[in-house]
Image (tube, grey):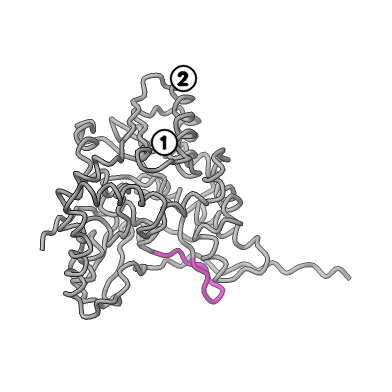
Amino acid sequence: MNKNLLHNDQFYYQVDNHNTVSKNEAFMLANGDVSKISFYQQNHIWDNVNLSVEPEQSFSSLCEENCKLYRQHYDHVCVWLSSGYDSQTILKSFIDSGALIDEIAFKDRSEYYSDPEVPFIEQSIRNYQRYYNPRVKINRVKIDLKYHENFYNKYAESIWYLGPGSNLRYTKSTANYILNFHDEFVQSKIKQHTRVDIFGKDKPKLDLRNGKWYVQSNDLVYFDIIGAPVECFYCNKLLPELHIKQIHMSIRFFESLNNLTHELVHQIQNNDVAYYEQWNLAMGRYPINCVQSKDSSIKSNFANNLKSKDAVKLINHLQKTTKQVQNVEGYRSDFLKDLPDPTIDLHQWISGKDWFIRDQQVTIPCNQN
């Protein structure tokens, strides 16, 4: 098998003494036994801080401090922008902090997908360029048919060992693919050892069990950046306090809800449309204008199946022009044959360490009589 495994010291899978950023290789090393696989989620950071104590600084002041730290530690700061709450809050934080951004990058999939985010991204960039930094570099990264043809012609046989897992989508537009395999982007990157690519990752994944709050390690939260040379704005080694602040803000939001249950916590954290805007604003995110991003409905366009809106046109094109893409299902079958159970769900989430935060605080209503 042709394994092209990528290095990453923040997020990876562990099977005994083996570390890998390929979820499929982890299944192979574990001989299909998911209980032998653990996900490493920046444990070197969170094992060495006190998660139970909330920082006194406000969320916005911590975000601004984070921007200044990036500016101090790196010569070239690149922010990857979407129209969503997380990345738009990063942009606003850089503006408020006075720290300049050297480059703003965003994905352009317009050749096969009418992305409703793009007009809002472009407007945000124009405003930043006009009012705050006219010299900022704008990097429109084209995730087009040519890029996908090139990817499949080069990597189709080893696709099951690239990136975080056996992604059923034919589109390869996540950070782990772009920053490692997009030739034009890789060649255009500033050749500096102190460059940083910042992504809006991520809100903490909380769990409520037996009246106790935990923050979970879960690979599905970070699947799109596992193996990518990127920094997570909201959880990083420069300012762990920002992640800790989010944990406590999130817990307070959940405890403010009526009829709080374990199931409701996970329902909301899975981007439930009814709660999405309220949850993000409670987590300190700035309001946004893109309707599809406001309620998370845009995320359904990238459902993990071959019939998703972003895949249909691309699949039709690739099946006509790229012979290798026709072999992908065959490579997948060959991979599964090497496992004891060929029907195994390769997309099941992999957990890691859980960190206890505090006991649940239950508010008892006053007796009206």
- Residue flagged by tag 2: what amino acid is it? Arg
Write down the quadrant of residue 108 in the picture.
top left
Q: Does the rendering let one see residue 352? A: no
Query: Which residue lies at the image location 68% right of the left edge and 65% below the top edge?
Result: 258
Residue type, label 1: Cys
Q: Position of residue 113 (x, y in %)?
A: 39, 43
Left-right relation of 80 to 96: left
- Viewer-side residue, 309 vs 23: 309
Label 2 or label 1, whichever lies nearer to me, is: 2
Magenta stretch encompasses residue 212 = yes
Secondary structure mostly taken by the magenta-highlighted segment of the chain: strand
Q: Where are the magenta residues, as a range? A: 207-217
- First of labels 2, 1 by sequence position: 1
Give the crowd class for mark 1: few <14, some 14-19, many >=20 residues within 10 Å.
Answer: many
Secondary element at image label 2 = helix
Taking the spot 86% from the left edge, 68% from the top edge, the residue there is 368
Q: Quadrant of residue 186?
A: top left
Which residue in the structure is indicated by mark 2?
Answer: 130
The kind of secondary structure element at disc 1 is helix
Residue 337 placed where, x, y %?
18, 75
How far apart marks 2 and 1 lie (CA) works out to 20 Å
At a point 35% along the width and 62% down the height, the residue shown is 219
Figure check: 88 above or below 258: above
Screen quadrant of the C terminus: bottom right
Q: Horizontal and vertical percent for residue 323?
A: 17, 52
Q: Position of residue 240 (x, y in %)?
A: 40, 50
Residue identifier under label 1: 67
Res 115 quadrant in image: top left
Residue 243 visible from this viewpoint: yes
**Image check: 182 left or right of 270?**
left
